[in-house]
Amino acid sequence: MREKEIQFGTAPKIFGTIMYPSLADEKKPAILLIPGSGPIDRNGNGKKKNQKLNVYNQLAHFLTENGFITLRFDKRGTGKSNASFIEAGFWDLVADGRAAVDVLKQQQEVDSNKIFILGHSEGCMLAPEIAKGNDIAGLILVAGAAQSMHEAMIFQREQSVKELQNIKGFKGKLISLLKVPQKAAKQGQKFDEKVLKSEKDVIRYQGIKINAKWFREHFQYNVKSGLEDVECPILAITGSRDVQAQPEKVFEIAQYTNVETDAVIVEGMNHMLRDQEEDLGILQIKRVYKDVGNQPLSKELLDSLKKWLTQHV
């Protein structure tokens, strides 16, 4: 394999990495990786020490080893890409994804008729819009299919409240006495209301800067309608231990699509696409993701990706 850094766009300038499987003369199929939410770079890593997730570099290596050219890139305001992360909205990220597709089409080594998009987490919501009008060969939606950002947030809040209510002993009694679950539920509703009423790109909520434009545009986006417009085959895949997106939602995706759609749940896989033995909740997510970047991706996930891609190239 070989790789090179690439830059596309002018405002903002986006930097990424293209990996090539070989120096063969024939054109190769290509896969664009669309990342999940948060200020993460082309490898899926944040700036802090405990944010080394290594999701997209591992995915890119696997896919390139199996004959695909891959492109992964730093989101706005992360890695080497400029502009502001906190000021970017849903449609800004779609525009960056569409620019990335254009770059792939321009590569002489790429078969422009065989470009796939793999979206992870938030990338599942962005991918259908990026694909529009681009003659994409297929969509792979990992850990977030058929679910809007607002639905995912509500799911996460409900899990948090349920876990707080189930805490035992003195700590549980204290949480109940202080009505922490009820307060947490109300805070979520207040947050949603403030974001939807806002008009600025960035607002303050409880003293913290919030990317209001991003939340607002996500809340207003109709995921189901976006899926109805997809014109290429879809693979939707998620893990049974995913606490950030509802695993069973993956089977609903076929209700909203008009194309060949396959859905898979990988037993024991979490949101970061690793096998997880313990059944841990969302309040224990820091423990779940500690040192996750050093772990390999789920073998069952990789096998499913390889099988589906082989059928559709």
Image: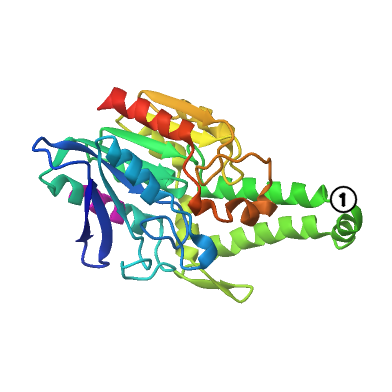
**Which of the two residues, 233 or 51, is positioned nearer the viewer here?**
51
- Residue 234 within the magenta-colored segment of the rendering: no
How many numbered discs?
1
Relative side of 169 to 181, left or right: right
Q: Where is residue 26 in the image (x, y as percent from the top left)?
A: 10, 35
**Which of the two residues, 195 or 214, is positioned nearer the viewer here?**
214
Residue drawn at 67 percent across, 41 percent down: 278
Indicate the quadrant containing the C terminus: top left, top right, bottom left or bottom right: top left
Q: Residues within 10 Å of mark 1 (few under 14, many from 20)?
A: few
Q: Where is residue 251 in the image (x, y as percent from the top left)?
A: 52, 27
Q: Mark 1 points at which residue?
A: 168
Residue drawn at 66 percent across, 50 percent down: 282
- Residue 96 within the magenta-colored segment of the rendering: yes
Residue drawn at 47 percent across, 55 percent down: 37
Relative side of 135 to 27, left or right: right
Relative side of 29 to 92, left or right: left
**Which of the two residues, 14 or 278, is positioned nearer the viewer here?**
278
Relative side of 63 to 215, left or right: left
Q: Is residue 198 above or below residue 31?
A: below
Q: Where is residue 86 in the image (x, y as percent from the top left)?
A: 44, 68
Give the magenta part as a residue range.
95-102
Q: What residue type is labelled 1?
A: Lys
Callout 1: helix, strand or loop? loop
Residue 120 seen from this side? yes
